[in-house]
Amino acid sequence: MPPSPHGLPGRFVVIEGVDGCGSTTHTKRLTKALREMDIDARLTCEPSTGPIGGTIRQILQNRLVVADRSGPRPFDWATMGLLFAADRLDHLDSEVLPGLEAGKVVVSDRYDLSSLAYQSVTAKDATSVVPWIRELNRRAIRPDLTIVMDVPAAVARERRESRGGDEEIYDSRDLQERLVAVYARAEDLIPGDRVVHIAGDAGVGDVAARVLDAVREILPDTTDS
């Protein structure tokens, strides 16, 4: 079992990937599986359910826009980076840290890797974006494990379309295809973090089993089973 990067009794697991990768499905399945093993697990997500997270969700759904002289448009990438960072610190303070301090396994659907990935593909100059996003998130503790769900862009797009509903601001085909390439090199964005890639286009049961196997590797010895 590797040492925890945050020094708290619990374990912090993040599942990441492009929209339609299956992160929401597998954070839920992982939390359920851990609880069935009598492990105290807490499920959470980003954007969070807090006030800043609620604002972000409205922006993502095009319910909040910038009104300028040329007409309504989405918020600038830098504004989104600041909002995500603020929501993350609120999320840590209200959900993640209390869970880790209580010895729980906290399972989050997305974390700061999403900011690094999404803001770097929406900004005009990606080379200057990544250091800035890292600085904004400097106080964000490091997860014990980040699982990246790798899926082809076409598979992720089909899943998004099958959900129905209106297209969100990051759902364009070109952007999502670029995100697939960014997530494939996630280790470059979060150097030093423990990252495991799992093919997310396999059967749901097979993927869930691989996710659980990866998480077992970072659980305290007293909870191995």
Image (cartoon, helix red, strand yellow):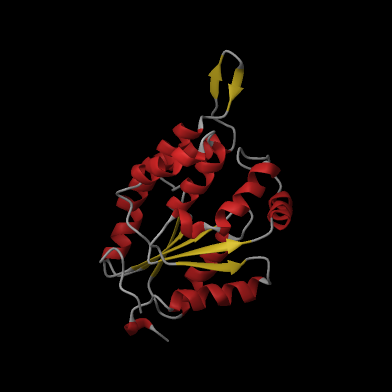
Q: Give 176 or 103, whichever is nearer the viewer.
A: 176
Above or below, comparing residue 118 to residue 44 in the picture: above
User: Which of the image's four quarters has the N terminus?
Assistant: bottom left
Residue 19 is at least partly visible in this image: no
Q: Give 135 or 143, whichever is nearer the viewer.
A: 135
Q: Looking at this rendering, what residue extends furthest in the top direction? A: 69
| 60 sits left or right of 104 in the view | right
Percent x, y for residue 112?
43, 51
| 224 sits left or right of 173 in the view | left
| 99 sits left or right of 153 in the view | left
Quarter-of-image position of residue 85: top left
Percent x, y for residue 124?
54, 33
Quarter-of-image position of residue 103: bottom left
* Residue located 32% across and 62% down the image: 99
Percent x, y for residue 167?
67, 40
* Residue located 32% across and 48% down the image: 138
Quarter-of-image position of residue 71: top right
User: Which of the image's four quarters has the C terminus?
Assistant: bottom left
Above or below, comparing residue 190 to residue 72 in the picture: below
Exactly how many numbered labels are in the figure?
Answer: 0
Q: Looking at this rendering, what residue extends furthest in the bottom direction? A: 225
Percent x, y for residue 182?
56, 52
Q: Give 91 or 174, whichever is nearer the viewer.
A: 174
Residue 118 is at least partly visible in this image: yes
Above or below, comparing residue 180 to residue 211 in the picture: above
* Residue located 54% across and 69% down the image: 29
Above or below, comparing residue 51 to residue 63 in the picture: below
